[in-house]
Image: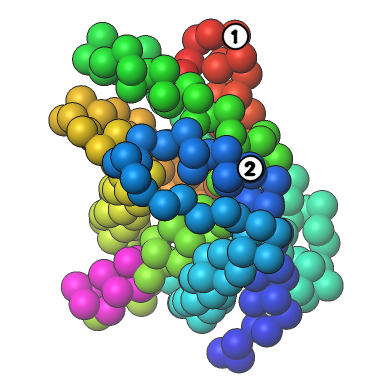
Amino acid sequence: MRFNTRLFLILWIAGVIGVASFLLVDLNAMLHSMPFPAGTEIPDFNFTLKVLSLIQPSVLVAIAVFVGVLLAPKVGLSAPFAEALANDGDRIAALGPQVIPGIIGSLVGGAAIILVGFTSRQFLAAEITQRISQFGEFLPLPTRLLYGGFVEELLLRWGVMTFLVWGGWRLFQKGERVPTATIFVFAILISSVIFAIGHLPIAYLLFPAHTIALTMFVIIGNSMFGLVAGYLYWKKGLESAMIAHAVTHLILFSASYLGAYF
């Protein structure tokens, strides 16, 4: 099976667009709002530094995209719309079946995260809930949609989950022609937890005196959405998970504006 270079470039460019959306973030204001110890020297992020800061995530996206392009076809996973673009196929037929499941997934995922947030309020200090709200103000909606929808899905679903399915299949089911549902379920669970843990560094940076309640809020909320996105990727395709992720951010943004979320 030949490596699909056009598919790699299409997905990687989508990921770079998501990474580049961080140029819209006022990093200087964000950093100065963080509770660094007194006397900490905070660098001034001019445009050049902001551009340079995009190199590492762009490389990580390239690695994840490479892994997915190489391994996804071997385990029955796909990015139907991107593959249609790469192979001059029917784009509408590829994307159409993914839209409604993606929107339904966003409603389920968004409701779950809002419920976790609402439940967590009674365990989180007022200072923490206030700072979570302030941090959200630094992230423009386009950044949330593009980074979450493109970058995080390419990293966690297309890259990590695909690798876990392939690795589990090769290690534990060598006799099977394709991975069984058990392998997919475990890959979804593990990649969801990894997705959630990946949000902890910024949470701990915001709250140096972090608590168990904060840790559980971050892990449970993000893991629940990871389960939804992983299922959509498995059953419908990568773009369905991307749609769900982007629309979930739109739901959370709206809920925050209405006072129903942080």
Residue 77 locus on image (x, y percent): 50, 64
Q: Residue at x 63, y 42 (%)?
A: 26
* Circle 2 SS class: loop
Quadrant of residue 219 in the image? top left
Asked whether residue 166 is drawn in magenta, I would say yes
Mark 1 Cα shell of 10 Å, populated few (<14), some (14-19), many (≥20): few
* Circle 1 SS class: loop
Q: Residue at x 32, y 12 (%)?
A: 126
Determine which residue is flagged by label 2: 26
Q: Find the distance from the CA under tag 2 to the CA under tag 1.
A: 23 Å
Give left or right: position of 169 versus 52.
Answer: left
Residues drawn in magenta = 164-173
Identify the main secondary structure in magenta: helix
Determine which residue is flagged by label 1: 258
**Quadrant in the picture for the N terminus:** bottom right
179 and 230: which one is in front?
A: 230
